[in-house]
Amino acid sequence: MDHQPVRVRMAPSPTGKFHLGNARTALINYLMARQSGGQFILRIEDTDTKRFVQGAEEMLMDVMHWLGLDWDEGPDVGGPYAPYHQTKRKEIYLQYAEKLIEQGDAYYCFCTPQRLALLREEQQKRKEPHHYDGHCRDIPLEEARRRIRDGEKPVIRFKSPREGQTTVHDYSRGDITVENRNIDDYILVKSDGLALYHLAAMVDDHIMGITHVVRGADWLATFPLHVLIYRAFGWQEPVWIHCSLFLKPSGKGKMSKRDAAEMAKDGYSIYIDDLKELGYLPEAVVNWMILMGWSLDDHTEFFTMQDLIKNFSIDRLNPAPSAINFSKLDHFNGLHIRNLSKEKLAGLLKPFFEKEGYKVDMERLTQIAPLIQERMITLDDAVRFAGFFFKEEVLPQPEELAGKNMSIDETRQVLEEVIKRLSDLPDLAHEIAEPVMRSFIEESGYSAGQVFGIMRVAITGQTVSPPLFESMVIIGKETVIKRLQKAIEILKDMAG
């Protein structure tokens, strides 16, 4: 592919949540535009009014911004081809539909829903694929227009060729040839005058100068129809690219809503706003999803957006279906978390602590961030690892307080000695506190694992925590002593 500036578009329907397939399609379009110095356009395909979901448009725009996919033209920023909502372009589509009718490439269809239902039933009985039988295909145009004047409200269908073959070309897949008898006379305009995708998207792509149409492989079934519409108008076709399908994690079959519900139980989702809530970074989601269907080489895996803009090429898109691998998402999220500055990480962690009711001091959180950065997979891990920093007091589980192979009384004596030695220190700086504790361990005959394990549970309330002495510095000497004393009280209650 040459590097002329391209004009590409993302054209989602506001009919629900923004899923992984939409996001990857948007990303590929965005990378092509940014790499070539072209334009990335957002167009809202909202003609499916029955499936319209209130708030879905705002949500998909928020999610695209979160992923870092900003557009050059669209409903909120305007542009030379406004409006960018298809419901506001109704008259444009009707003009083009009328042109197809005039030249004999489309026709008015007056079949009632009842007749079409009966037709479908009969075809099912004969085990035939459902298709329109062409009942209205040859109604003279003047008769059709008279019936419309008399009050009938027809749909407009494309008059697909019945003989021969149609060959279409996909950039990644090569030539695809279909028998014309298998191409249905699809509806282009509904009886209420609203155009369907098949006409509206083709008209908009032509008018808006779209050079490359990048979309999901689920559009391959109607790809020949769309090319025939272009050819009926005599327009130059864009470069067509149908991205690979996503398979369920097992690799067997396409993703379904039921599969998505099962994933949610394991803390995963195919919906991008859910991934944000679950603590995934946009950089990691971008890195993960581009590698399902594209690669730079056989070893490079870590990419920032700038890396992708520099290195992406549609020549390396793989049309083969890709199984969704959430372990890879976890892997990339960990890598990108470790790539953040402590200030940036702290800022991202703050809402997760606040969501759990913690009052967050940003200075303290910035100190904490490097202590947990290496161990985190998702941002919400931080609350589990480090919530104890923001608690007034911690309440250790009594059974976890007792040292390994130690009695309650021995554990209590260790804590009393720890309090005594820490109380004598000016502060709990790592270089001061740790040598003092190491000396005690040598004198006592207990192991470091026993003593530090008891201290960890008493001070953090957890058996696993960030590094102990660094944590003690952040918690502060006074609070550390209070928590050790509380642990002694718990042990005394245990002893009765």
Image (cartoon, grey):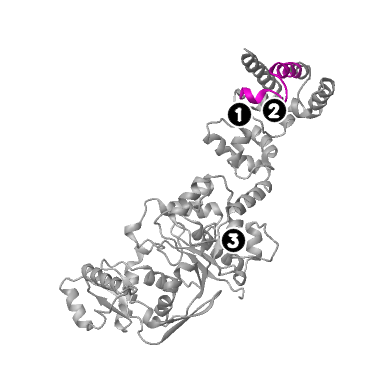
Q: Give the structural element (helix, strand or loop) at label 3.
A: helix
Q: Which residues are magenta?
A: 397-418
Residue behind mark 2: 456
Give residue 148's position: percent from left, percent from top.
19, 74
- Spatial CA span between label 2 and label 1: 16 Å
- Say which quarter of the image contains residue 29: bottom right
Q: What distance separates the C-alpha of mark 3 from that of mark 1?
A: 38 Å
Which percent across, then down, holds residue 474? 69, 29
Looking at the image, the residue that sits furthest to the left is 150
Task: Name the quadrant of the N terminus.
Answer: bottom right
Among the two numbered marks 3 and 1 on one chain, the one whose residue lies closer to the N terminus: 3
Residue to which mark 3 is pinned: 290
Magenta stretch encompasses residue 412: yes
Callout 2: few (<14), some (14-19), or many (20+) C-alpha neighbours within 10 Å? Answer: many
Please tell me whether residue 380 belongs to the stretch shown in magenta.
no
Q: Secondary structure at mark 1?
A: helix
In this view, the residue farthest toward the bottom is: 164
Give me the residue at 76% from left, 22% from top.
Answer: 427
**Chain-order first, disc 2 or disc 1:** 1
Q: Which kind of residue does numbered mark 1 sit on?
A: Phe
What residue is disc 1 on? 390
- Asked if residue 299 is positioned above or below residue 264 in the image, the reply reads below
If you read the primary sequence from the N terminus, does the residue marked by circle 3 or circle 2 appear first? 3
Q: Is residue 82 or residue 390 the one in the foreground?
A: 390
Q: Does 162 appear above or below 86?
A: below
Image position, residue 374 (x, y; %): 69, 43
Within 10 angstroms of label 1, few (less than 14), some, or many (20 or more) residues? some
- Magenta stretch: dominant secondary structure: helix
